[in-house]
């Protein structure tokens, strides 16, 4: 890397500019990221380890953890399937409405999650369009786990597809064509050629998807109904604790969420390293 | 026959990518599809592989029709342009992929991949990943992978495209050796003619979705049939001359027709090819060597050092009036440019500006197949029928169509730019694949049309019939008359209705059929797929001696039509020529009426209406008038 940078000497900034930029970035990250995280842990342990442990092992907290995991794992599973299908569709076929589809895919990023939650309530709630029909079948979506899963899936839709599309576009269909010619069926090609090739991009997309799913607040907040021990996810649980002035407990649970986020970041970093190693192999090959 | 394509047609949306391509590749042959980028050659390859399904036509591999068989079941090996190696698999896994799909045991697979790696000279690289390979190594892995399961056919798409020049030469040789060793029928796609020459048993030259010519490298270089191949394969001089009394007239020079030259009609355009190394030069004619084909005096204009050879460019005055196809003159130069070649060790290379006598060791005459058509677009009237007929004729004959617009001043011409553009659009809406040029000219209509007809070496000039009000019943339209008499180029006068030219009536009412009118009619009829009738009107007082002569001529005319593959018959009636002809035209629904016209009959008697003009009045169909010698 060092060498490549030296090659572009003309566009390198002077030493002082570099130092100022580095200091600025470090200060910014410190104030807005590291400091708050530190405060979360500081507050979490403010009433001692025992209080922390009690807050975390509280049945209501555990049920919130359980629900959060269910919701995020469902989101990851759904979006893995949907993301691969969507990316395959837009990269392998040219059809009318393709651009529209790619734009629509980004709607969850653009729309406020609260609005998304409201839409689901209006659509599936008791007085919504499909509400009476669902009730007739005795299915409850809103204010229950299915609604939470639905919302989580909705807000995380773009993550996998957005990772895969540029990657698959860059690869082109050549390897698949080669596999066809060599006698592989469509399914064999997907299993032996396509999936291994997009493996890291897919995992990266799934990790991002997971991170977003666990932290989701807005949409879930609207459809959950805040029934403790039943429809509370971790972020909602934290809000309730906070509103009830149980700061230490709130921060303790927050720290749990923060730890999950850090773990996700760790996995993301590992995947990035793996990806980098693959590309470095490429650099080696071209020398 | 290992690979056969029958009239394969493929469109991508509106664009015609493969235009009725038929070809057959022999067992164990290395067949090369040569063409510039975008010519459709790779798509042809993909049709054979099954990656593209043709809209119509069929693909036959080893006697089995595989048109609707998916690529998995065709058993072909393909080396893709960028090799398309599986990046996440090792070299060995790549090679074994096809075997694994075919459920071969791991042990056998390993044995086969080792064998192949040895064959392509990459033993020891089995565990590398594609990203760790150089371009040449990747190419060889792709090759090994393609032939691993012993397919019956190997297809290669620009296999050397991404490689350094040095490695290319080496790999070419090893590919050819490997192909002969394995004995696999191979189709290779390339845009590089040097590569095609070195590798191919036979080459098919592809242009705009069509196969222009197929032949051995030797044939295509020394004796191409078409101008496209003459220019595309190797450097060459292609000059336009005219056939004149059994010789080729190039400006002031006459060349004899070589023995193998295709037959040309008197006055027809002749395209002469000579490669730079066929040009000999010397201070005197007898020193120039050559086989007595004297070209004339040339002045050296340019010389380029090219390593082994020096490229010389001469300007010849004696060829003035014969048009060079490839090389165009700079402003201020008047002659014709001819490229020559000399060994860079030769002692007698002239300096720039020096004069030499040029002669030819050999020359080659191209086939007179494709029609060169000039269509005169009229200002301020409906050109619809003219353009439709011209586009149809140019399209079916794969010929060249030039649109001529004349205006009296430059300003007028600029104002009529729109007319030119709309005419172009109209032609292209009829035939998308036509070769079209536009010739705007400033000057008097008649003079410019005659000049263009003469200088452009056209086979036929299309003119619109004048509006009824201004039509002179006694004589041919003025422009037509002048083109026929001064330029001696055949004319088609088109009326208000366009036509597909499916029924051709060759009238010999005036006298016996000439050679040139029947030949041109036969060429047109062959391209449009028309049926033809040779029609003769006999006067009541004809002697039996004359009758026998006419019969002989008629059967010769029929023989010519048959040799062009045109379905034909002969009808002889007795009576007054123009009356009988009128009746025949009314009855027969003919699309094209052909008459031969001698100089005498065109200029004619000012007091008597000319026969040609009467024919023109007798029909609304297009009339082809061919000037015949008196």
Image: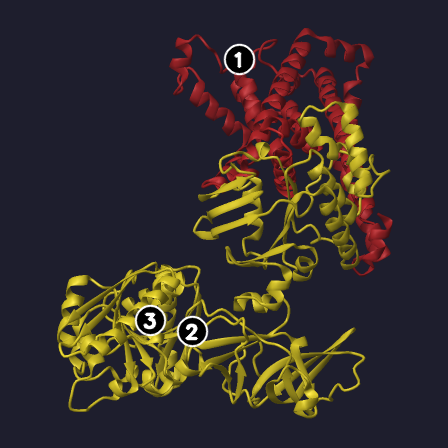
Same-chain status of marks 3 and 2: yes
Classify mark 3: helix, strand or loop. Answer: helix
Q: Which chain is red?
A: A
Residue at mark 2: B438
Q: Position of residue B256 (x, y in %)?
A: 53, 81
Residues tagged 3 and 2 counted as in contact (Cβ below 8 A) = no
Q: Nearer the viewer, mark 1 or mark 3?
A: 3
Residue under label 3, please give it: B518
Q: Which residue is mark 1?
A: A144
Mark 3 and mark 2: span between their CA atoms? 29 Å
Subunit that carries the residue with mark 3: B
Residue A254 vertical placement versus B343 (above, below): above
Q: Is residue A169 left or right of residue B437?
A: right
Q: Quadrant of residue A218?
A: top right
Pair 1/2: label in front: 2
Per the rendering, the colour in which chain B appears is yellow
Residue B382's place in the image compared with A6, above or below, is: below
Q: Nearer the viewer, residue B501 or B544?
A: B544
| Residue B415 visible in the snapshot | yes
Residue plotted at (78% across, 33% down): B113
Q: Is residue A156 in view from this perspective? A: no
Which residue: 79% across, 29% down? B110
Image point 82% across, 14% down: which residue? A48
The kind of secondary structure element at disc 2 is strand
């Amino acid at each position: 890397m060092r060498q490549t940078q030296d090659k572009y000497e003309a566009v390198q900034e002077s030493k002082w500019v570099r130092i100022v930029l580095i200091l600025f970035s470090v200060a910014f990250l410190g104030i807005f990221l590291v400091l708050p995280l530190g405060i979360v842990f500081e507050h979490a342990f403010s009433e001692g380890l025992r209080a922390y442990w009690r807050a975390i092992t509280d049945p209501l907290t555990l049920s919130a953890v359980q629900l959060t995991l269910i919701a995020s794992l469902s989101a990851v599973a759904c979006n893995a399937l949907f993301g691969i299908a969507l990316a395959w569709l837009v990269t392998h076929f040219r059809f009318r409405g393709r651009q529209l589809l790619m734009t629509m895919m980004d709607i969850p990023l653009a729309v406020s999650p609260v609005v998304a939650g409201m839409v689901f309530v209006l659509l599936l709630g008791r007085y919504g369009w499909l509400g009476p029909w669902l009730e007739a079948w005795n299915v409850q979506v809103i204010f229950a786990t299915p609604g939470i899963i639905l919302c989580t899936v909705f807000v995380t839709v773009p993550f996998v597809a957005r990772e895969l599309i540029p990657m698959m576009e860059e690869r082109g269909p050549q390897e698949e064509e080669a596999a066809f010619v060599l006698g592989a069926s469509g399914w064999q090609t997907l299993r032996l050629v396509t999936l291994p090739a997009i493996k890291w991009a897919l995992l990266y997309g799934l990790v991002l998807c997971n991170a977003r799913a666990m932290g989701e607040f807005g949409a879930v907040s609207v459809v959950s109904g805040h029934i403790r021990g039943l429809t509370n996810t971790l972020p909602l649980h934290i809000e309730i604790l906070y509103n009830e002035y149980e700061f230490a407990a709130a921060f303790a649970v927050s720290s749990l969420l923060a730890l999950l986020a850090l773990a996700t970041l760790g996995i993301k970093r590992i995947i990035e390293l793996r990806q980098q190693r693959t590309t470095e192999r490429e650099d080696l090959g071209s020398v | 026959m290992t690979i056969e394509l029958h009239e394969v047609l493929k469109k991508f949306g509106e664009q015609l990518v493969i235009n009725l391509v038929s070809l057959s590749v022999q067992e164990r042959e290395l067949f090369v599809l040569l063409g510039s980028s975008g010519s459709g050659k790779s798509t042809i390859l993909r049709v054979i592989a099954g990656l593209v399904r043709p809209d119509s036509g069929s693909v036959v591999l080893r006697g089995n029709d595989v048109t609707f068989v998916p690529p998995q079941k065709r058993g072909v090996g393909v080396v893709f342009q960028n090799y398309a190696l599986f990046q996440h698999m090792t070299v060995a896994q790549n090679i074994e992929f096809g075997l694994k799909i075919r459920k071969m045991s791991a042990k056998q697979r390993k044995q086969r991949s080792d064998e192949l790696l040895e064959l392509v000279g990459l033993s020891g690289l089995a565990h590398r990943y594609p990203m760790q390979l150089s371009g040449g190594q990747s190419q060889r892995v792709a090759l090994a992978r393609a032939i691993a399961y012993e397919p019956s056919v190997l297809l290669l798409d620009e296999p050397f495209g991404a490689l350094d020049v040095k490695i290319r030469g080496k790999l070419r040789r090893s590919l050819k050796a490997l192909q002969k060793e394995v004995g696999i029928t191979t189709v290779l796609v390339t845009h590089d003619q040097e590569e095609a020459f070195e590798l191919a048993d036979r080459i098919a030259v592809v242009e705009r979705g069509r196969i222009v010519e197929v032949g051995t490298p030797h044939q295509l270089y020394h004796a191409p049939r078409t101008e496209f191949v003459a220019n595309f394969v190797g450097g060459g001089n292609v000059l336009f001359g005219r056939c004149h009394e059994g010789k080729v007239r190039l400006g002031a020079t006459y060349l004899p027709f070589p023995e193998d030259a295709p037959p040309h009609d008197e006055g027809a355009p002749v395209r002469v090819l000579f490669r730079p190394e066929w040009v000999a030069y010397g201070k005197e004619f007898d020193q120039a060597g050559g086989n007595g084909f004297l070209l004339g005096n040339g002045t050296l204009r340019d010389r380029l050092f090219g390593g082994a050879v020096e490229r010389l460019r001469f300007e010849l005055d004696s060829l003035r009036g014969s048009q060079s196809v490839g090389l165009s003159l700079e402003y201020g130069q008047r002659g014709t440019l001819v490229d020559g070649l000399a060994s860079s060790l030769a002692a007698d290379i002239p300096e720039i500006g020096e004069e030499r006598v040029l002669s030819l060791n050999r020359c080659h005459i191209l086939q007179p197949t494709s029609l060169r058509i000039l269509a005169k677009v009229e200002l301020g009237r409906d050109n619809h029928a003219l353009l439709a007929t011209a586009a149809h004729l140019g399209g079916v004959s794969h010929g060249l169509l030039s649109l001529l617009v004349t205006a009296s001043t430059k300003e007028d011409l600029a104002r009529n730019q729109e007319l030119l553009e709309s005419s172009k659009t109209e032609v292209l809406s009829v035939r998308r694949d036509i070769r079209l040029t536009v010739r705007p000219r400033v000057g008097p209509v008649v003079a410019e049309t005659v000049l263009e007809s003469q200088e452009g070496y056209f086979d036929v000039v299309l003119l619109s019939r004048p509006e009824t009000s201004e039509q002179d019943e006694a004589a041919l339209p003025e422009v037509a008359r002048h083109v026929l008499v001064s330029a001696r180029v055949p004319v088609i006068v088109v009326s208000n209705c366009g036509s597909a030219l499916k029924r051709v009536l060759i009238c010999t009412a005036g006298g016996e059929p000439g050679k040139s009118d029947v030949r041109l009619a036969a060429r047109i009829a062959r391209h449009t797929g028309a049926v033809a009738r040779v029609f003769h009107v006999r006067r009541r007082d004809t002697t039996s001696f004359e009758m026998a002569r006419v019969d002989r001529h008629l059967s010769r005319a029929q023989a010519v039509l048959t040799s062009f593959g045109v379905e034909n018959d002969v009808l002889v009636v007795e009576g007054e020529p123009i009356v009988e002809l009128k009746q025949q035209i009314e009855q027969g629904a003919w699309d094209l009426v052909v008459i031969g016209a001698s100089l005498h009959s065109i200029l004619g008697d000012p007091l008597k209406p000319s026969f040609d003009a009467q024919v023109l009045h007798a029909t609304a169909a297009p009339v082809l008038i061919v000037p015949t010698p008196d």
